[in-house]
Amino acid sequence: MSDPVRFLTAVTQALSTMSLYGDDHPATTRGLETALERLQELQEIDPKLQFTFLSGEVVFGSEVVHELEGWEWSDRLVRAGIERIEMLGPIDVDQFGRFLSHMAMRLGIRPGSSTDIWQMGDSPIRYGQVTLGQGQNPMEILRLEPVRTMAYTLGEERATMDWVHNEIQKGAKIPMVEADAVVRSLSIAMHAEQAMVLPLLQLKEFDQYTTTHSMNVSVLAMALGEYLELGGATVRALGVAGLLHDLGKTCIPREILVKPGKLTDAERVVIRDHPVVGARMLLASPEPMELAAVVAYEHHVMLDGGGYPALHDARGAQYASMLVHVCDVYDALRTNRPYREAWESERALAYIKDRSGVEFDPGIAQAFISMMRHWDQRISTMPA
Ligand SMILES: [Fe+2]
Ligand SMILES: [Fe+2]
């Protein structure tokens, strides 16, 4: 068992004991002391610690704790509004005890009121939510210190995605585990700051367009999903769908993709086929990715039925496809293309507003615009 696992296990044991015996029982005291010992072992290496809880996942510092994948307590903590715990320095038994009883109250293990906010005082423990925009409890956010220790370059994730695309080009099955891992890292990077900062990648070589673009669309789709309060599992599924929406492009010859001039009719047919090709690949993968396949198929379909391919279903494209469509267009406009310069964010947002109700679903377009306006000043663009 690794040290973070030992510590978190000891905390949950202490909390369970607390629920059985109450605060002053010797068993509770013992549980508390054991958890504190485990904490002090962890703090020997570095007294500053940070745990992030996503649904079904625990991140210690910037590392996913694989042993705790699917751990039921991470869901419980998220539901209780405890998405991040930070220890800023050494903690004494009194401070730790107060924090555990507060956690027990938040988790509904012992009675308390939801207005009972964490009286931080001199305690070096902070906790709170790390979600974007709406639904935050400002009292808790104020009590979270900005965390700027994690520098994400996402270089490894980009390399993984390049590899995923190469594998598919060679005709291999879609490596879903790797794609999932990339989405997980993007989600962590997105939540890494006290206030969410969208990590958008800058394009270096046009050859890397599909990789860079897929990762940006994935982050934008997850951010928009959170902004619309769609819930953890849906947000993650949108991240996967965003990452794989242009998978069909891996089958398009490079000369066509990077061609600076006008396309011939035959070339345009090849390009316009990528949604169908991508959807087919996703449905044929070992674990068929249904939502991702639908999104791949429909991400160029406009609200008024324009775009491609033509849908037979009069209800039009699915909500997830329309959501990814907005993110897709935004990132494409913000990128230098062989035939035009990248647009400024405001210009791209004005375009989306202008086409709202025709190309874009008005509700989704409006949410996207207000989300981007809110975050534009703080978007961190990762160097290529
Ligand atoms: Fe596309
Ligand atoms: Fe795209």
Image (spheres, rainbow, N blue to C red):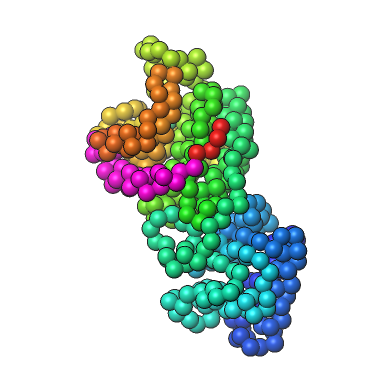
Which is more toward the observer, 56 or 145?
145
243 or 382, which lies in front?
Answer: 382
Residue 160 location (% of width, % of height): 62, 35
Residue at 59% from the left image edge and 35% from the top image edge: 158
- Residue 77 is situated, as x and y percent measured from the top left of the image, at 54, 66
The residue drawn where x is 43% and y is 23% is: 337
The residue drawn where x is 54% and y is 45% is 186
Q: Is residue 35 left or right of residue 157?
A: right
- Residue nearest the viewer, comparing 317 with 215: 215
Residue 174 sits above or below residue 220 on the image: above
Left or right: where 297 falls relative to 50: left
Please provide percent x and percent y for residue 43.
Answer: 72, 64
Up the image or down, 329 lies above or below 95; here it is above
Q: Is residue 318 magenta?
A: no
How many marks the image carries: the answer is 0
Left/right placement of residue 217 relative to residue 356 reads right
Q: Quadrant of residue 346?
A: top left
Residue occupying image coordinates x 49% and y 34%: 214
Res 293 quadrant in image? top left
Report the predominant secondary structure element of the magenta stretch. helix
Assign the N terminus to one quadrant of the image: bottom right
Position of the C terminus by quadrant: top right
Q: Position of residue 292 (x, y in %)?
A: 46, 39
The residue segment tinted magenta is 356-380
- Answer above or below: position of 70 versus 116: above
Judge whether residue 364 is colored magenta. yes
Quarter, ligand 2: top left
